[in-house]
Image (cartoon, helix red, strand yellow):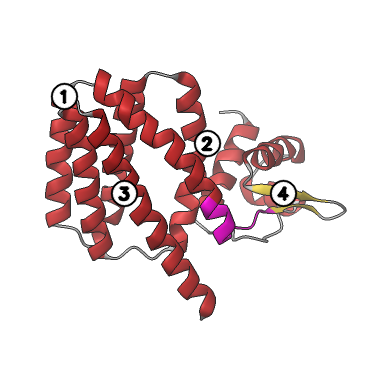
Amino acid sequence: MRASDKAYEALRTDIVEWRLRPGAMLGEVEQAERLGVSRTPLREALARLVADGLAIQERGRGAMVSDVSLQHVDNLFALRRALEIESARIAAHTADPAVFAALSARFLEAGRSATIETRESFFQLAGELDRSIDAAVANPYIEQALRSLRVHLARIRRLAQDDPERLATSAIEHASIAAAIAARNPDVAAAATQLHLHHSLEHIKNHAGSREDT
């Protein structure tokens, strides 16, 4: 892996995981030393983060981690609805039903055993559903847009402290999406996706709002 790629991946992960919080300065000397790279590849990594929207360039101050606000959340979900609802429709026409029937069953099982400790395994399963839908859609432009979007979605997820009740509900919602795709019903797949996104947005905004009030 090139030094610039190494620095980019490390910084992106730290931003998504909130180890580098909004407003944190990304000083070239400090970050280059921390990551064990020279300043030239670090500058390349920072430029990629700025292009991704994960960092901004401050005149005279250097790069800093970009802010996350409820307005950002609304904007991201507007794009997410457009991409994911259409993807669910397409997948319902093209997907292998057996793949999505199996995913639906796994989500139902995840919903029955959801705990805060199973959060990461749940997100891995959700990622598997995303990749299966991407493969069924087979549209490189949609896939590229979603890949970029999902980095930001992983970051804003940290605004909401997911609890077992929400994980269980989300698992059932994912199961419904997968089941509708397996049944080759594009309208139901789209409606199930829209419902899930509505609940996800409300959950994030409610938790983020309560956190801002404290």
Give the amino acid at mark 1.
Answer: Pro
**Separation of marks 1 and 3 at Cα, in angstroms:** 21 Å
Q: Which label is found at residue 165?
A: none
Q: Identify residue for label 4.
A: 56
Number of other residues with Cα within 10 Å of mark 1, as a class: few under 14, some 14 to 19, many 20 or more = some
Give the residue pinned by disc 3: 196
Left or right, residue 17 beside residue 97:
right
Expressed as whole percent of the image width and height from the top left, the position of residue 192 reads 26, 42
Disc 1 designates what residue? 97
| Span of residues in magenta | 65-74
Residue 190 magenta: no
Give yes or no for contact between labels 2 and 1 (Cβ–Cβ under 8 Å): no
Crowding around mark 4 (Cα neighbors within 10 Å: few <14, some 14 to 19, many 20+) is many
**Left or right, residue 26 beside residue 133:** right
CA distance for labels 2 and 3: 20 Å
Q: Amino acid at mark 2?
A: Ser
Q: Earlier in the sequence, mark 1 or mark 3?
A: 1
Which residue matches tag 2? 148
- Per the image, label 4 sits on a secondary structure element best described as strand
Q: Earlier in the sequence, mark 4 or mark 3?
A: 4
- Helix, strand or loop under label 3: helix
